[in-house]
Image (spheres, helix red, strand yellow):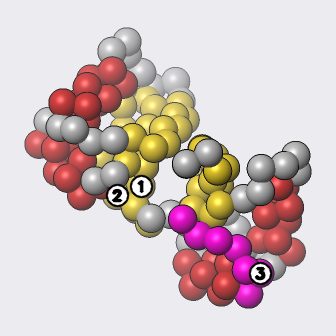
Amino acid sequence: MKQLSIFLQNESGTLTSVLDILADAGIQLYAVSIADTSDYGICRLICDKPDEALAILRNAGHAVSQSDVRAIIIGDTPGAAAETIRIFAKEHLSLAYLYTFLYENKPVLVFRTDDKEKASDIILRHGLKSL
């Protein structure tokens, strides 16, 4: 799955500007996560047309990058996220970050790792369902 990371100044209205650009282009957002420092924020998002969104945001002057992330459908029960993350921990897979969202009423755990091949192997061996 492709994720966009947009670097935003910590100023009122910058996030709204990005979201308006995407809305005007008819791009559907599925997940949005924001991490911030004192000077800037990183808005990570998953949408229906990541390549188009990347081009539109770059043309609008935003600093944006695209990266591959994994999205795993997890159970809709307390502890399901912990169980899934425990699988990766036992396999010594480092996660750079993660967040969750609902897709078609199913919880989805999104994460990035530097070892994509190992992540794919773990997902396959443990019968985890990728989105």
Quick check: marks 2 and 1 in contact, CB under 8 Å? yes
Residue type, label 2? Gln
Residue type, label 3? His
- Counting from the top left corner in percent of width and height, residue 76 is at 77, 50
In the image, taking residue 6 as reference, residue 76 lies left or right, namely right
Spatial CA span between label 3 and label 1: 24 Å
Bin the neighbour count of mark 2 within 10 Å (Cα to Cα): few under 14, some 14-19, many 20 and up: some
Residue that badge 2 annotates:
66
Residue type, label 1? Gln
17 is higher (above) or lower (below) than 78? above
Residue 122 appears in the figure: no
Q: Of marks 3 and 1, which one's residue comes earlier in the chain? A: 1
Question: In this picture, which residue range is highlighted in magenta?
Answer: 125-131
Q: Of marks 3 and 2, which one's residue comes earlier in the chain? A: 2
Q: Residue at 37% across / 12% down in the picture?
A: 12
Bin the neighbour count of mark 1 within 10 Å (Cα to Cα): few under 14, some 14-19, many 20 and up: many
